[in-house]
Amino acid sequence: MATPSLLPADAEEEARELLYEAYNELQALAAELGGAAGVPAVVVVGHQTDGKSALVEALMGFQFNHVGGGTKTRRPVALHLRFNPRCDAPQCRLLAGPGDEDEDAGVAGRPMPLADIQAYIEAENMRLENDPCQFSDKEIIVKVEYKHCPNLTIIDTPGLILPAPGRKNRVLQSQASAVESLVRAKIQHKETIILCLEDCSDWSNATTRGVVMQVDPDLARTVIVSTKLDTKIPQFARPSDVEVFLHPPTCVLDVSLLGDSPFFTSVPSGRVGSCHEAVFRSNEEFKKAISSRESEDITSIEDKLGRSLTTEEKERIGVGNLRLFLEELLRKRYIESVPLIIPLLEKEHRNATRKLHEISQEISDLDEAKLKEKAQLFHDSFLTKLSLLLKGMVVAPPDKFGETLINERINGGTFTGSENFQLPNKMMPNAGMRLYGGAQYHRAMAEFRLVVGSIKCPPITREEIVNACGVEDIHDGTNYSRTACVIAVAKARDTFEPFLHQLGFRLLYILKRLIPISVYLLEKDGERFSGHEVLVRRVQAAFRRFVESTEQSCRERCMEDLESTTRYVTWSLHNKNRAGLRHFLDSFVAPEQLLVNTLHEQFPGLNDNRQDRAKTDSKSNHSSDTNSSGAVPETRLVDLLDSTLWNRKLVPSSERLVYALVHQIFHGIREHFLVTTELKFNCFLLMPIVDKLPALLRQDLESAFEDELDSIFDVTQLRQSLGQKKRELEIEVKRIKRLKEKFGEINKKLNSLRVRE
């Protein structure tokens, strides 16, 4: 079967050579332009066991791939095939894909023996097999001319994987997802013809079609191929089964698919070579075996059906018929795409011409005065972006530059004390949001306030209280107020100092993140100049040095505050006021009860004497109770002072007194530490970026100008690189112009031929 030609038979050969030559050149240019020019191509999609690589070889007319079980194709192979009757052996040329490393290896663009290209592809597959990514979407582009080649562009993709369920197959499931994403990306372009391979005898099983229909739901640009026909024919027991297989009902396979019905192919097994394992001695034998297999398949089907196949049915069977259909279909797409290619080439020509003019202008601007002006402009723009990031903006995409609180803690450190307590994410506002700049700075400071503000005084042991009592320089009594101060300031220093270093490290990390975001904003606004990487690195390095030194200075100021607060206790600061301390002590025990309990614990004998005296006095005279009631508190107070000053036995009342004082002093230090630390970091870290950084960067640039201009711009290297870019752009402009003129000529010929019709 052949698709009706758009050109008269006598004019077809006249336009054929020019058309294919232009598209071959366009394909090479499209690879360099990153696919900017849409070129029609056949993308082969199938699962690992569908015979995908074998079918590609049969379409090419010679064996090329490493065919076998498992994943053999880990990187798409784009085959630009060209029929050339003068080539008795395949003439191959390896081309580099966009961004391919081979561009630097000297491999791309030169003729290579077929065996070398096969070895290169197998080496790439082996490399990717050991690579963490396992697969790559960069195409290996091979241009082939051969007398048995069709005029086709075929892209062989990695085989789809059907992994088994279960956690133990997670690696294979991850690979399957990666391959499916790669394949979908390759078939999404509207110029693409999808060759969908199915290895099944029941069309209800849409394994490969399930993936293809995610991109092409109506199969309007999809050719369905049932592979391994020779293995399926013996499976059918009745002629009706064969009829359903050859003519699937519309409820199973939509009639809107490209070509109206499926193709059926068989590829003979065996490799070409001279070794004893080889089945075919040459590619000619391989091609003859393909034709023989086609005839055998038709005969087998006719035997099963009990009738002869119609011409239309025969045109659907065999690799040869599929090849003719694809070649004619692609040629038709080529002709239809000609009017669309011309505007694209004109756009690329304008872009390349504009870039060439910009490069020429940059070369002419390589004098000292203009370079200084550019440096100053970059300096001002960089500072403007920094200021906007701190004040708040939404131009930079949060998914690229923002960080959630979890990521921020991983990269910038966490606020953890001696007990490794960490504030849960749900307690922090905006914890799940991806923030940057001033918003991220504010969230970090808020987390610092919450974490430090929730810290309680560490536990106090009896040994710590006794050791803190010590011996005074003028008497050997105990001073529990001094004891409380010694314990409180020691625990406060050990508790809060780590948080000071953690806050400095976290805020420094957040400020350093402003650099890549600012550079992105400059590039987005077109304010960063190509080739001035030395200037950019110098400004970035100066910013890093500034924030690091400023953070260190600010942290030292905060350390001075912490040291002064934990070195000398000022009751008005640490305790706020006496009323507060009295209220705090009252919450532990009432003053009267405190005295009584202390006397009972220190002098148990006094308790019995008081009871006996009370009984005697009660019998003798009731009025004595009234007279002695004013003297009892004074007596008890004297007993309390005696016990606390001269007795080293730590009783619960003394322990509670020290505990209360320590907690009051500790919490006073905490409140003072929080207020002064936040204030100092805002004043001496954040504000200097606004009011001191511009002058420092300007001074750094001026000192660099005085030393040598090359220290900022590397003028010699810049002139060489710009000159190389200019030469490459001049070549590209000429190529695009020539190709645009060639497609314009083809379009004129096609229009003239249509007018004659």
Image (cartoon, grey):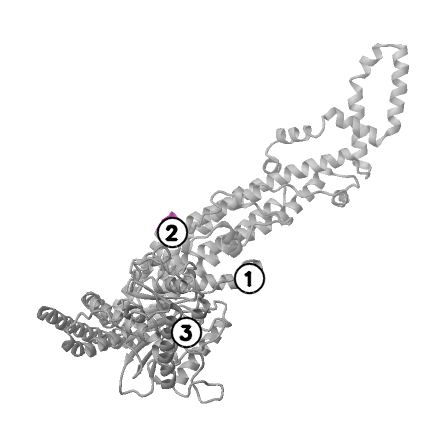
Residue under label 1: 169
| 388 falls in the magenta region | no
What type is the residue that disc 2 sits on?
Answer: Leu
Compute the Cα span from label 1 to label 2.
Answer: 45 Å
| SS under mark 3 | helix
Residue at (55% x, 52% y) in the render: 414
Q: Which mark is residue 389?
A: 2
Task: Say whether residue 41 is left or right of residue 584.
Answer: left
Position in image of residue 219 (x %, y %): 32, 60
| SS under mark 2 | helix
**Upstream in the sequence, badge 3 or badge 2?**
3
What type is the residue that disc 1 sits on?
Answer: Asn
Which quarter of the figure has residue 43?
Answer: bottom left
Q: Which residues are magenta?
A: 389-394
Residue at (48% x, 56% y) in the render: 509
Question: Is residue 226 visible in the rendered structure shown here?
Answer: no
Position in image of residue 128 (x %, y %): 47, 72
**Upstream in the sequence, badge 1 or badge 2?**
1
| 390 falls in the magenta region | yes
Between residue 128 and residue 172, name the one nearer to us.
Answer: 172
Task: Say whether residue 564 is left or right of residue 345.
Answer: right
User: Considering only vertical position in the picture, is 634 above or below 164?
Assistant: above
**Upstream in the sequence, badge 3 or badge 1?**
3
Compute the Cα span from label 3 to label 2.
Answer: 53 Å
Q: Which numbered mark, 3 or 2, is in the foreground of this view?
A: 3
| SS under mark 1 | helix
Q: Which numbered mark, 1 or 2, is in the foreground of this view?
A: 1
